[in-house]
């Protein structure tokens, strides 16, 4: 197991380094610049600003300095648009907000989605199964950019139960709608994957053997069927969990949470490459990290994968 983890780490480190380099190249290959505007700055002023941020240096030197600072100091440099603020500071401000409702979304999506999937598989071709399948199809047809305005219309404008936006330190009434908007489609996907996987396992020979021995159905499910049935679910959870804990640009903007998605959108409009690269690399790191965790969990559940 240790050698397997070591091998996965040896793959993850250069992958992260390549991500940082490619992010830098793509951002600086994009047309325009962070200080371009409809009213061009005087050449001397523009030269002074570029010198302040090191943009007057050759591209290769900028890239080497940037990659070195990211790898050795985890420093994404200063923002081009937010004066006197670093990219690290901006991420530190927005990421806790996104992380809060993202974790709640992940917890609810996993618990509810897996439970619905297992229940639907055990009660196949019953009303519970039909309702679960209908919920999965309906929820997947409502992505978060559709769900968010619908929630605002229903719970804010019609019923007046919840505020339509804001954060207020993460008070529960401000968290509910972002969590619902973000978790619903993931919950539906988890229910569908769990149901399919559980049905396949329940129809396998070793489950038939367990039933033939007279074991209680609860024991058959918990001791024999659940573990192999969760393998596809765990595979899905890696990128899905990153998608949830990093939130959604749509959810951040729709509910004005002040999360990291709003900074990403504002930076894209303002061509603040430093913030865009910082957030992109952060997402990439989380994706690599959680995929690594999923690979380890997968190998722990099914030892054949280690070899």
Image (cartoon, rainbow, N blue to C red):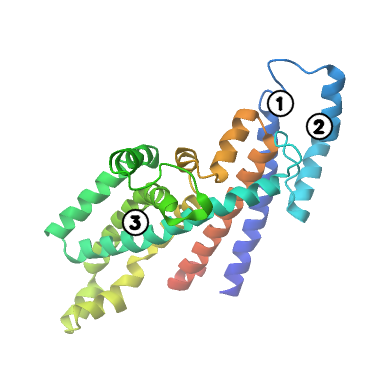
User: What's the mark number on residue 207?
Assistant: none
Tell me residue 251's x, y (percent). 45, 42
- The reply to whether discs 2 and 3 touch (Cβ–Cβ < 8 Å) is no
Name the foreground residue: 114 vs 58. Answer: 114
Left or right, 42 with reference to 197: right
Residue beneath label 3, please?
Answer: 190
- The reply to whether discs 2 and 1 touch (Cβ–Cβ < 8 Å) is yes
Tell me the SS state at disc 2: loop
Tell me residue 31's x, y (percent). 67, 23
Residue pictured at 80% horizontal, 38% vertical:
62
Which picture quadrant has residue 286? bottom right
Residue pictured at 36% horizontal, 37% vertical:
149
Name above or below for residue 266 compared with residue 66.
above
Residue beneath label 1, please?
Answer: 33
- Asked if one can make out residue 246 in the rendered structure from this viewpoint, the answer is no
Left or right, 10 with reference to 122: right
Left or right, 299 with reference to 4: left
Name the foreground residue: 113 vs 90. Answer: 90
The N terminus sits in image quarter: bottom right
Name above or below for residue 304 compared with residue 34.
below
User: What's the mark number on residue 55?
Assistant: 2
Name the foreground residue: 265 vs 152. Answer: 152
């Amino acid at each position: 197991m240790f050698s397997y983890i070591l091998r996965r780490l040896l793959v993850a480190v250069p992958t992260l380094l390549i991500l940082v380099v490619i992010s830098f190249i793509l951002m600086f290959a994009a047309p325009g610049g962070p200080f371009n505007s409809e009213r061009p700055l005087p050449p001397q002023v523009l030269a002074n600003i570029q010198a302040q941020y090191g943009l007057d240096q050759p591209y290769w030197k900028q890239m080497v300095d940037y990659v070195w600072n990211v790898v050795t100091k985890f420093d994404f440099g200063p923002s081009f648009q937010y004066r006197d603020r670093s990219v690290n500071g901006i991420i530190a401000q927005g990421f806790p907000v996104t992380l809060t409702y993202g974790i709640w979304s992940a917890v609810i999506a996993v618990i509810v989605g897996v439970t619905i999937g297992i229940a639907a598989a055990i009660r196949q071709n019953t009303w519970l199964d039909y309702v679960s399948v209908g919920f999965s199809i309906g929820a997947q047809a409502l992505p978060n950019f559709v769900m968010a305005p619908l929630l605002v219309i229903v719970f804010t404008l019609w019923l007046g139960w919840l505020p339509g936006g804001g954060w207020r330190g993460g008070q529960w009434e401000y968290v509910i709608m972002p969590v619902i908007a973000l978790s619903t489609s993931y919950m539906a996907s988890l229910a569908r994957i769990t149901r399919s996987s559980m049905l396949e396992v329940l129809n396998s020979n070793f489950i038939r053997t367990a039933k033939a021995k007279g074991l209680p159905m609860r024991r058959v499910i918990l001791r024999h069927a659940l573990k192999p049935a969760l393998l596809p679910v765990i595979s899905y959870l890696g990128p899905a969990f990153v998608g949830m804990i990093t939130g959604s640009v749509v959810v951040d903007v729709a509910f004005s949470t002040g999360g990291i998605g709003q900074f990403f959108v504002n930076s894209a409009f303002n061509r603040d490459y430093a913030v865009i690269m910082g957030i992109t690399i952060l997402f990439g790191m989380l994706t690599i990290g959680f995929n690594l965790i999923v690979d380890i969990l997968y190998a722990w559940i099914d030892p054949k994968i280690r070899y």
